[in-house]
């Protein structure tokens, strides 16, 4: 199975900060990488698909980059509604594993 | 609008089975497969498997292959996930989800609300 790791596991940031989350795959997954946001008690919400495509309705402050094994999710200016946990997921090969998550909370 | 509505919370004893339903609306049911995702308390999501609503083909994560059954009912636009031989570490929220984005397989853009399954003696 392809293993997904994320760093950091948590971070504290302020409104307006630029935030970067990293995801690494244990082998090359081309650009088959998706990012999700999850708030407590809610289902994950798709933000970015195929590494860099912004899902419809998602604010443009979210962006994704990377290919192969290393990927990044960037929030250009953190907003109050962005405090949540973020997960990456590979969709290259089954099982389509998720990363362990990065919790973004208020500094 | 696309909606996936799941059945309610369940409490089961170890060794029992649970069957979770996922009723789809707002799209042609057979156009998209249904994925199932498990999320244990405080953990990240875990992909369990997928079923084609068109022809019933399935694909499972190996760790669930022996215990999970995925089915669909095209007469009611409903998908089902049955997990057998439940253990306490199966306590989790189970989600159904679909990917509708062309060229982005398994980018899950619509999710059900989740079903909490608690396994306890």
Image (cartoon, grey):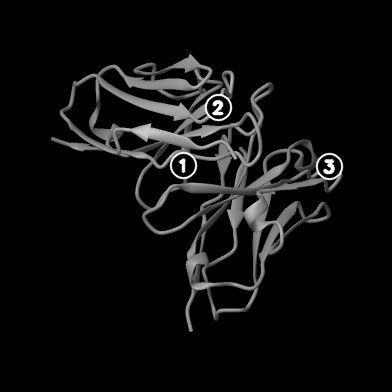
Quadrant of the image for the N terminus of chain A?
top right
Q: Which residue sits at x=63%, y=29%?
A: A92
The residues bearing labels 1 and 3 have C-alpha atoms spaced at a distance of 25 Å
Q: Is residue B80 above or below residue A5?
A: below
- B73 and B119: which one is in front? B119
Q: Which residue sits at x=50%, y=40%?
A: A98
Q: Residue furthest bottom?
A: B121
Q: Is B56 placed left or right of A27 in the picture?
A: right
CB within 8 Å, label 2 to label 1: no
Within-10-Å neighbours for mark 2: few <14, some 14–19, many 20+: few
Q: Residue furthest left?
A: A107
- Residue tagged 2: A27
Q: Which residue sits at x=59%, y=54%?
A: B5
Badge 3: chain ID: B
- Residue tagged 1: A44
Q: Is A105 placed left or right of A68 in the picture?
A: left
Q: How many marks?
A: 3
Marks 1 and 3 share the same chain? no
Q: Secondary structure at mark 2?
A: loop
Q: Secondary structure at mark 3?
A: loop
Q: Which mark is residue B54?
A: 3
Quadrant of the image for the C terminus of chain A?
top left
């Amino acid at each position: 199975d392809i293993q997904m790791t994320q760093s950091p596991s948590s971070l504290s940031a302020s409104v307006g900060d630029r935030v970067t989350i990293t995801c690494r795959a244990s082998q090359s997954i081309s650009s088959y990488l998706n990012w999700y946001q999850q708030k407590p008690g809610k289902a994950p919400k798709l933000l970015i698909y195929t590494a860099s495509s912004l899902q419809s309705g998602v604010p443009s402050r979210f962006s994704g980059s990377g290919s192969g094994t290393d990927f990044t999710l960037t929030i250009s200016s953190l907003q109050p509604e962005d405090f949540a946990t973020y997960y990456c997921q590979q969709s290259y090969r089954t099982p389509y594993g998720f990363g362990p998550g990065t919790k973004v909370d208020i500094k | 609008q696309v909606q996936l509505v799941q059945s309610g919370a369940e409490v089961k004893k170890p060794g029992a089975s649970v069957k979770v339903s996922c009723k789809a609306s707002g799209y042609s049911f057979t156009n998209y497969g249904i994925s199932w995702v498990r999320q244990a308390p405080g953990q990240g999501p875990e992909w369990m498997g997928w079923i084609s609503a068109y022809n019933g083909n399935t694909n499972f994560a190996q760790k669930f292959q022996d215990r999970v059954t995925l089915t669909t009912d095209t007469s009611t636009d409903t998908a089902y996930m049955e997990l057998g031989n439940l253990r306490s570490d199966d306590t989790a929220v189970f989600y159904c989800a679909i990917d509708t984005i062309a060229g982005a397989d398994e980018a899950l853009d619509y999710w059900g609300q989740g079903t909490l399954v608690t396994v306890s003696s």
